[in-house]
Amino acid sequence: MGTIRVDDQVEAALARLGGFGESYNDVLRRLLNVPDRAEASGRWPRDARKMRAILAAGLLAPGAALTWHRRNLDVTHTAVVLPDGRIRTEDGAVHGTPSGAADHVTGGYPAKGWRVWLTEDGRTLGELLAQIPTETL
């Protein structure tokens, strides 16, 4: 792989544009509209393909807000759906799946993202997924 040398100002700009956990390469891919390697190879995680199907069906729009209220802790997490179906959590981290986003906000404790993330109208992502014909997934 090649190496690209950048000056301090460019490096600082990449750092500002990047979300938590995003590499400079991730930032450049996003800015240049270059697909993720997994996407380009067709090896996206199954759950990521499911989120893209929900977006394609118009059941959820890019930029849609998601929330998860954890009653026991009295904590509410927020996230945003990105145009490619990934989910950006409130700290800026980007996740390929709802469960990955949920696991992240719990600090690594496994969570069922399809059940816990709610849309603005109170539906779970799983409820939206149930409206997609399984043969399209």
Image: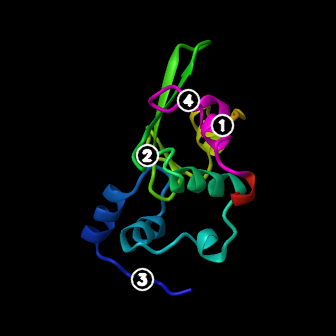
Secondary structure of the residue carrying tag 2 is loop
Q: State the quadrant of the C terminus.
A: bottom right
Say which residue appears at 69% left-offset and 59% top-offset.
Answer: 136
Q: CA distance from mark 2 to mark 3?
A: 25 Å
The numbered dot on residue 19 is none
Secondary structure of the residue carrying tag 1 is helix
Indicate which disc, 1 or 3, sits on the residue closer to the N terminus: 3
**Which mark is in front, 2 or 4?**
4
Task: Specify few, some or many for label 1: CA neighbours under 10 Å numbering under 14, 14-19, or 20 or more.
Answer: some
Q: How is the image coloured?
A: rainbow
Task: Give the residue number, with chain letter if any, for mark 2.
Answer: 92
Secondary structure of the residue carrying tag 3 is loop
- Look at the numbered discs 1 and 4 and tell me whether their residues touch, using CB distance below 8 Å: no
The stretch of residues the image draws in magenta is 114-133
Task: Give the residue number, with chain letter if any, for mark 4.
Answer: 123
Q: CA distance from mark 1 to mark 2?
A: 23 Å
Q: Magenta stretch: dominant SS?
A: loop
Task: Give the residue number, with chain letter if any, for mark 3.
Answer: 4
Task: Give the residue number, with chain letter if any, for mark 1.
Answer: 126
Q: Amino acid at mark 1?
A: Gly
Farthest residue toward the left?
9
Give the vertical position of 50 relative to 69 (above or below): below
Q: State the quadrant of the N terminus.
A: bottom right
- Look at the numbered discs 1 and 3 and tell me whether their residues touch, using CB distance below 8 Å: no
Residue 6 is left or right of residue 119, and the answer is left
- Where residue 111 appears, as percent x and y from the top left, is 69, 33
Task: Specify few, some or many for label 2: CA neighbours under 10 Å numbering under 14, 14-19, or 20 or more.
Answer: some
| Figure quadrant of residue 12 | bottom left
**Which mark is in front, 1 or 2?**
1
